[in-house]
Each structure stands twice: as structure tokens, then as C-alpha cells.
Image (spheres, helix red, strand yellow):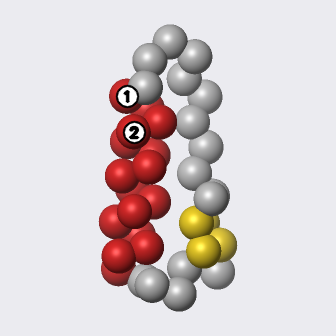
Amino acid sequence: MKLLGISGDLVGKKTANAVNEVLMRAKKQNPDLEIE
């Protein structure tokens, strides 16, 4: 299974950081998960 994180924030990095954190936690819960 592949999980794709999309961030559309043009001004700051908070949204991108939040998306990345969610992807990393999902990967930690399920090591077989592919993330992008």
C-alpha cells in the first residue's frame, strides 16, 4: 500500500511539516507502507 501526502501551502512550512509528521508516524505503525 502506498500513502501519498499532499501539502498545498504556499506561504509557510507548517502544513508540509504536519503532513511529513503524519507520514512518518504511519510508516512507524506499518513498516510495509510506502510513503511519498
Q: Is residue 13 above or below residue 12?
A: below
Q: Residue at x 45, y 60 (%)?
A: 23
Q: Secondary structure at mark 1?
A: helix
Q: Is residue 7 left or right of residue 13?
A: right
Q: Is residue 6 above or below residue 32?
A: above
Q: Position of residue 7 (x, y in %)?
A: 57, 36
Instruction: For the residues labelled 1 and 2, say whether their Cβ atoms are less than 8 Å apart.
Output: yes
Q: What residue sits right under mark 1 in the picture?
A: 14
Q: Which mark is residue 17?
A: 2
Query: Real-space Cα distance between discs 1 and 2?
Result: 5 Å
Q: On the rendered structure, is 8 left or right of 28? A: right
Asked which quadrant contains residue 2, the reply is: bottom right
Q: Give the amino acid type for the residue marked by disc 2 in the picture.
A: Asn
Q: Residue at x 35, y 79 (%)?
A: 29
Name the residue: 43% across, 73% down.
27
The secondary structure type at the circle numbered 2 is helix
